[in-house]
Image (cartoon, grey):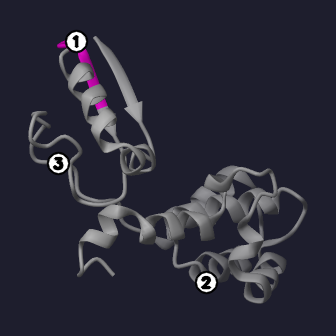
């Protein structure tokens, strides 16, 4: 038995649905292969020819305050609990924002200091400056909103 995890699948799905559909059909033909796909949206890729497990998993929600603080501390331990709570609250407990801010915290910046920077700079602060667009919250949100799946659903926004 093998497991294949395809994360952020909407990126490739939106770019070439016809060829990706063929690939999914091929992968689906391997009976000892389990495929897990994570993607934004509710439309199952290849739903007409691939028998996905039912029911599909519920969409992920934002983190709870406690989980958000734990996620931050797993990356960057801190004793600035009040600052951390205010920081994760300011980004509405969004996992990507918390992870990126926690990585910034590794540069000896306290959550209180990060909060001040966040309130001043907002999403430009979350770019890791490594040229990888998937690490930027603003780009991630833009990709989501501009994706064909979102554009096809008038009630998505």
Separation of residues labelled 3 and 1 (CA atoms)? 20 Å
Say whether disc 2 or disc 3 marks the residue closer to the N-terminus: 3
Which residue range is magenta in the image? 30-35
Q: Residue at x 34, y 63 (%)?
A: 148
Please report whichever mark, 1 or 2, sits nearer to the chain's N-terminal start.
Answer: 1
Q: Is residue 96 left or right of residue 11?
A: right
**Along the line of sight, the residue nearer the viewer: 66 or 128:** 128
Say if mark 1 contacts mark 2, CB within 8 Å.
no
**Quarter-of-image position of residue 4:** top left
Residue 19 x %, y %: 32, 33
Which residue in the structure is indicated by mark 3?
56
| Residue bearing the label numbered 2 | 90
From the image, tell me which residue sits under label 1.
32
The 10 Å Cα crowd at callout 1, few under 14, some 14 to 19, many 20 or more, is few
Residue at image coords 9%, 34%:
51
Q: Is residue 46 left or right of residue 157?
A: left
- Counting from the top left corner in percent of width and height, residue 143 is at 50, 64
Q: Nearer the viewer, residue 94 or 82?
A: 94
Residue 83: x %, y % from top left: 73, 80
Q: Distance between the Cα atoms at labels 1 and 2?
A: 44 Å
Which SS class for mark 3? loop
Mark 3 residue crowding within 10 angstroms, few (<14) / some (14–19) / many (20+) = few
82 part of magenta stretch: no
């Amino acid at each position: 038995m093998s497991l294949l995890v395809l994360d952020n699948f909407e990126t490739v799905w939106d770019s070439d649905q016809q060829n990706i559909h063929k690939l999914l059909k091929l992968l689906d033909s391997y009976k000892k292969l389990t495929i897990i796909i994570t993607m934004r949206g509710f439309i199952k890729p290849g739903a007409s020819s691939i028998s996905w497990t039912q029911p599909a998993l519920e969409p992920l929600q934002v983190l709870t305050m406690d989980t958000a603080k734990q996620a931050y501390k797993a990356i960057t331990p801190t004793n600035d609990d009040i600052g951390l709570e205010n920081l994760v609250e300011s980004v509405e407990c969004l996992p990507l924002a918390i992870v990126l801010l926690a990585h910034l915290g590794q540069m000896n910046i306290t959550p209180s200091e990060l909060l001040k920077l966040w309130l001043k700079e907002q999403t430009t602060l979350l770019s890791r400056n490594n040229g990888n667009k998937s690490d930027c919250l603003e780009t991630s949100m833009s990709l989501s909103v501009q994706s064909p799946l979102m554009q096809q659903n008038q009630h998505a926004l």
